[in-house]
Image (spheres, rainbow, N blue to C red):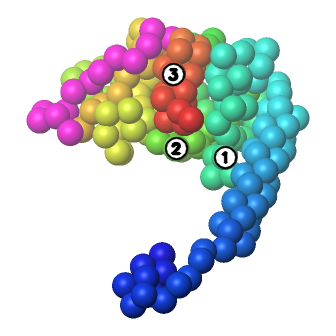
Amino acid sequence: MAVFEWLQTKNIGVSLSDIYKNEYEKEFDDFCKAQAQKEQELKQAVVSKFGYLKEIYPKFFKQLAETFSETNQIEKGKTAAEIQHKEAELGVRFSEELKTFFQYISVLKLEGVEIRFDALEKQTLNEKVFLILGEFWKYADGDKLFYDVENHNIVICAHEYQPPKQLKQADTMTTFVEKILFQYLKQQYKK
């Protein structure tokens, strides 16, 4: 357009062709179709690979199928024996809901969320015992996600506060997955 306008200032008659515009629109349309196809294939892959989550976490699974990307990672869960071994190793008793979560999912890595069974740690804060499940960046990057061993609440340790605050997220692991993670994914990947 700059060249067209410059030529007009020099009183040189020029007409614009629609060739470039038409080619650009065609190329962009092809790109959009390819992206839509890729998203559909990824959605089908999520359904086939992680469909087992639908029975225990239906809302989370539905949102996951809509928003899953190639950078996300989910690994199938651990056996009851592996979970019992981890409980003994940490000296902590897991709730049935936490056991169920780890029987279905051993690694959950999404944008701003990371939970890894093999990286579980025990930590005592203010004389309360917590498991560090991983990270949940709901308030700030790097916020730790805790499981309160005594009352089974899911808590974030929001480190940006001085002193850091423990912010309750859910009463149970199932509520955390079905409500909090579901809502978080929905917000993160709004189209």
In the rendered view, tell whether residue 174 sits above or below residue 139.
above
Among the two numbered marks 3 and 2 on one chain, the one whose residue lies closer to the N terminus = 2
Marks 3 and 2 sit apart, C-alpha to C-alpha, by 13 Å
Quarter of the image where the C terminus is located = top right
Residue 95 picture location, percent across and down:
57, 13
Among the two numbered marks 2 and 1 on one chain, the one whose residue lies closer to the N terminus = 1
Binning the other alpha carbons within 10 Å of mark 2 as few (below 14), some (14 to 19) or many (20 upward) gives some
Q: Given the image, on which type of amino acid does mark 2 rest? A: Glu
The residue singled out by tag 1 in the image is 69
Q: Given the image, on which type of amino acid does mark 3 rest? A: Gln
Q: Nearer the viewer, residue 190 or 132?
A: 190
The residue singled out by tag 3 in the image is 183
Among the two numbered marks 1 and 3 on one chain, the one whose residue lies closer to the N terminus = 1
Q: Are marks 2 and 1 in contact (CB under 8 Å)?
A: yes
In the rendered view, tell whether residue 9 sits above or below residue 86.
below
**What residue range appears in magenta?**
160-173
The residue singled out by tag 2 in the image is 111
Residue at image location 56% in from the left, 82% down from the top:
14
**Which secondary structure lies at badge 3?**
helix
Residue at image location 30% in from the left, 21% down from the top:
167
Camera sees residue 122:
no
Residue 48 picture location, percent across and down:
88, 35
Single out the residue that lies furthest toward the left: 162
Q: Quadrant of residue 159?
A: top left
